[in-house]
Amino acid sequence: MNYAMALDYQNCINCKACEVACKEENGVQLGADKQRIWVGVVEGTIFGKPFANLYPAQCNHCIDAPCVSVCPTFASHFAEGGIVKVDAHKCILCKGCMEACPYDARFVDDTMVAVDKCTFCDHRSLEEGGTTACQTTCPTKVRLFGDLDDENSDLVKLLKTKRFFFQKEYTGTLPKLFYILPDDEAYAKQSVSHNTIIHTWADIKPLYDEARTRRSKEWKK
Amino acid sequence: MKVEISRRRFLQGSVALSVAGGAALSSTQILADSKEKSQTLLMKKVPTICEMCVNKCAAIATVKNGIVTKLDPNPYFPKSRNMLCARGAAGIHALYDPDRLKYPLIRTGERGDGQYRRATWDEAYEFIKDKMVKILDEEKDNRSCIGYCAGEGLAEHTYKTFMSDKFGSSNFLNHSTICLQTAVSGYTLTIGGYGQADLENAKYVIMAGANRAEAILTPDTMDMFKRTRGRGMKLVVVDPRFTNTAMHADTYVAIKPGTDLAFVLALTYVAILDQVYNRNYVAKNFVDFDKYQKHILENEYTPEWAEKITGVPAATICKIAHDFMAAAPQAVFYQGRRTTWSKNDFQLRRAMALFTALGGGIDVKGGIVFGKKLPLGEHTATAPMYANAKPRIDKNVAAVVGATGSWVGWRNMVAEGKTPYPIRGMFVYKQNPMLSVPNSAKTKLMFEKMDLVVVIDTMPSDTAMYADVILPECTYLEREDPVQSFAGIEPAIILREKVIEPMYETKPVNDIMRELAQKLTKPLWEITKKYDEDIQAELEDGDEKEVFEEGGFDLAEPFMHSQEETNKHMFVEKYGEEAWLTLREKGVFYPNMSTYFKKIDNNTYQYYPKDKKFYSVLKLEEEFDATAYLHDTCVNPVDIADLKRSFNTPNKKVECYLGSMASKGIDAMPTWKDEDHVKVPAGKFKFITGRHAQFTQNSTQNNIILLELMRENYIWINDKEAEKLGIKFGDTVEVASSIGKVLIKAYPTPKIIPEAVFYIHGFGAKSAGMTFAHRNGASDNEIIEDTIEPVHGCANMHDTLVSLRRV
């Protein structure tokens, strides 16, 4: 098992259903700055005409997760299927992981006195036919959670037919949120920067397989 | 759907309960509390129907030890397509809102100052009874001297049954004339119904003013945004603001507010002049097309003419007209919802409907369709006849005032003391006119003139602060509501079940109506006997008990059964006992659901097989009855039936010329009138308002988790205009119109045209009873002028000019 998520981000309407569903599902601390999941907005004008792009996001559950490497107490760890989690009992709130994360996906939960983050809803998504709260609730079905190891999963089937990219790939953490490049060329151009590398399943698979083999010894069962 | 799970399995989920007051219990705390006991936590899943907005999405509530811990989408309902938006998921915080109305309250201070004392239900009913008896005695049994209004909801009908059918007042108001009345009637009188745009199949859609990304409407929102950007649907968004919907458009057209009619007329001109419309469809289905053609061409509604008015380049108009007709009949000029914009609104909707019809996109897959409605059994009640009950006061404020009145017209008559007979009291259910009707100062004046104001609600809204008696209703998660059938391409029946018992001393409206009716029946019957000559005549020859019973004067009669019993009766009559069990278990039912419904993957479900969907009603060989094909409860079927009766529109035809309207002084065909258009002078802006995906009007303004997503509203102003006025982001500005002033923070942005400013409706509550909403942001209706359009008396929400000043 190697859990990941594809995001058809062009469907996003910034309704923030995912943010609320996540909070309710996981009992995330209240407060606007306490988010396991969010919608990134990039907006501006091109020759005077307004544009906006939306990038729904959460923890990338990187294969080479710097937040796990940096943790002095092993509170940050890889759970089943490479899901990056925090063991609240071991967390000493040094916040090193928050510094290390390229995605700013972590925050302090004051009620738990520990760092909190996305768990891919592993209490419900790993069940047969299960998925994350954010995927289920989404009106336009941006997300698809699945297993990269399973060639027959809906996720791999989708990745095989589409091109995709990662956010901040240059940090080299091997993130697992796959942003599906829109087929529409005009929109694809508008929503991707010049430096973004576009991938296919064939080109990325060896790299991810190798990393998985290397790191999966650390994954808890 | 009761499931018991062990404590161990529950804890594995590491689910923390998020409960009242925002306190979160962590799993470790649960462990610590119950370390040694191996008891099981009672968990159950109950299907319910969301009431955070008007869409009625099906949801499943998870209840653990009596606490609602999560609301998930219920995949079975075709209309809501297995989704729950931010507001839907935040329903828990409506239930556990610490500011909820908990007990009946009786006013002790002045109106509006929020001084109330806790009362028992009996005291509250007794108070209402004494006032009602006095008022009706003084008004000689004119039942209409008590007005009543209601917000949309599954229980709205229960309340109306009492106030209208049993109590007998004609003065009803609902959201229609501050919402979508003009669109409903414009489309109904033109193409026979409001219908549903088939956004799963349409190839070309023009959305003018409609904002489906931010004003979520099911299933339209879910269907369309999976098909934009080269995936089957070309989308043109016409709006003064670059909205989240515009972001998805192939073409975004910035337009000046109030000029959409000129835009549509020019589209029509191009389609007719260039002969690109569907001539075959028009020949078969249009009535008076020659008149319309002549009207459009002779008035020279050219794209160049429209460009001057709308600000939309003529070439863009030409291209849109041609592209639309090339995609037709799979092309729709989207009807829109909250459409009370400006004086020409009814004509605008007519022109839009006619333009869609010119392409032939009516009653056809990918066009505007009418679908099918699954029948339900009847629950009947006898409505008494009151000889002294007078017709509604506002019947002459516009050409056609329907059963839901004209909110602004009615309110102004009362506030200005211009009613033909006194309006002495008002019942308000689930509506907040202090915030929702233009010109709040006049609404306040209206309430101050009344001898009795009763508010039934879940929250201490601004309107509740003007009540003499507040009756606390339970939230939608604490009650069963009337079973409802939703028409559409994929029709279904849904049931809102009670998830938990009502908290505090709150009650469902069915119980409130029953108990109040029981209190009122006898004393009001005495008043009727005293003043009603018809009844007096009947009593001369008949037995009093018989006259009373047969006349339906027992006001409590329709409410004597529990909601569960009534629902079962209405459903089982048509579908049988087994289907009833399915409905209760799944929350949704439609014939053949067990074989039709399929999960394709975690994101996709099949509700009906492709060949079983109801795209065309005419091909069904059923009698075409537009009232049967309404797919949502915002559209009042009685109103539509009335409209069709009054105007005698022949079915199955597209009406270009409404002769019967002409006799009422209304243009028989959509006509641009320059004198009706509010122009923007230098130094002023046109104020527009709108919706947004995280709040529903003003009803969710105190919801703590939604406030995290958007803390307050900001005024949008074009960035260049802001620079001229020295206004920067976050500056407090004073926005002044002819009727009021508000203070609000500024959001300069290139996403709005220079002539207009905008802020979201639903903020700026003054009620101190709402901790988080109190004085948060600004209310639009404090500055929107109270003018109405001439056809239905709908509020002109976008005809107000304002000036801005940094303070």
Image (cartoon, grey):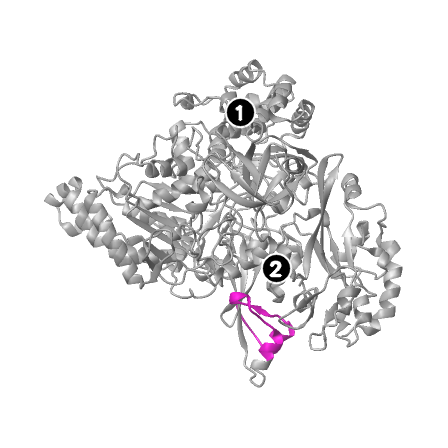
Position of residue B209 relative to residue B702, above or below, is above
Residue B76, horizontal then vertical, whole percent: 57, 55
> Dot 1 corresponds to which residue?
B285
> Is residue B9 one of those drawn in magenta?
yes
Which quarter shows the C terminus of chain B? top right
Quote the CA–CA distance across marks 1 and 2.
Answer: 48 Å
Residue type, numbered disc 2:
Ala
Dot label at residue A59? none
Residue type, numbered disc 1:
Asn
Position of residue B27 relative to residue B168, above or below, is below
Residue B297 as seen in the image, left or right of residue B124: right
Which element type, helix, strand or loop, lies under badge 2?
helix
Which of the 4 image quarters holds residue A152?
Answer: bottom right
Position of residue B130 relative to residue B385, above or below, is below
Of B459 and A208, the residue lying toward us: B459
Of A168 and B380, the residue lying toward us: A168
Dot label at residue A21? 2
Identify the magenta region: B2-31
Which element type, helix, strand or loop, lies under badge 1?
helix
> Is residue B388 one of those drawn in magenta?
no
- What residue sits 51% from the left and 50% below the top? B53
Q: Does residue B430 appear in the picture of this structure?
A: yes
Of B725 and A73, the residue lying toward us: B725
Of B335 and B179, the residue lying toward us: B179
Which of the 4 image quarters holds residue B143?
Answer: top left
